[in-house]
Image: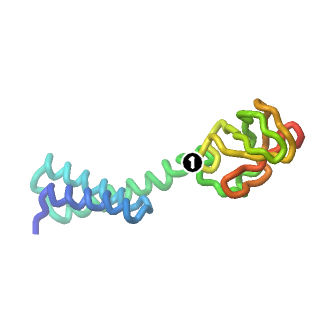
Amino acid sequence: MTLEWYHWAIAGVLMVLSELAVPTLVLVWFGAGALVVALALALIPGLELLDQLVLWLVLSLALITFWFRILKPYRSKTLAGRSSAQVIGEVGLLVGDIGKFQKGQVRFQSPVIGAQVWDCIADDPILAGTRVRIVSVEGSILKVTSAEKNL
């Protein structure tokens, strides 16, 4: 049985697309390996099936290793995706004045739980431009207090 370059290309595209259904970020690397084998077959026709399979396996495993060992640890430099308990204590800047138990907005330098600007409430009135610290997360609203108050 011989596989042509387009067989590998179709298999690669299908594996990359199947990553949409199974978001584990593993199938995409097998798909990328298949696409590279398709390119290699287009450039060097006549590769044996065993050579094709070995090339695909080695490329796929190298890409997976590269992703999980080198790239993925540096992927999350923001606070996005962190649980609410992990963001307690983060400091942001109050966008507008808020009164006691009134809603305001706080802006963070890097995204916190996926966004840079959040609605917030406070137990005491706080003026705009004040640095505030998260004390709790209540649904989709952050409860804050003046950062200087907690020193």
Where is residue 50 drawn, in percent x and y? 19, 65
Which is more toward the observer, 22 or 63?
Answer: 22
On screen, residue 28 versus residue 98, left or right, reads: left
Residue under numbered circle 1: 76
Where is residue 35 drawn, in percent x and y? 25, 53
Query: What's the residue at 44%, 52% (across, down)?
Result: 66
Query: What is the secondary structure assignment of the residue under circle 1?
Result: loop
Where is residue 100 drawn, in percent x and y? 84, 44
On screen, residue 17 versus residue 144, left or right, reads: left
> Which quadrant of the figure contains the C terminus?
top right
User: Count the marks: how many?
Assistant: 1
Which is more toward the observer, 60 or 127?
Answer: 127
Q: Quadrant of residue 97?
A: top right
Q: Which residue of the protein is positioned furthest toward the bottom in this rendering?
A: 1
Query: What's the residue at 19%, 53% (across, down)?
Result: 38
Where is residue 45 drawn, in percent x and y? 10, 52
Q: Which residue of the protein is positioned furthest toward the top in this rendering?
A: 129
User: How would you rate the neighbour count of disc 1 (Cα within 10 Å): few for under 14, some for 14-19, many for 20 or more?
Assistant: few
Query: What's the residue at 62%, 41% (across, down)?
Result: 116
Q: Amino acid at mark 1?
A: Ser
Q: Answer yes or no: is residue 55 visible.
A: no
Which is more toward the observer, 34 or 97?
Answer: 97
On screen, residue 16 versus residue 141, left or right, reads: left
Q: Answer yes or no: is residue 29 visible.
A: yes
> Which quadrant of the figure contains the N terminus?
bottom left
**Model colouring:** rainbow
Query: What's the residue at 77%, 54% (across, down)?
Result: 136
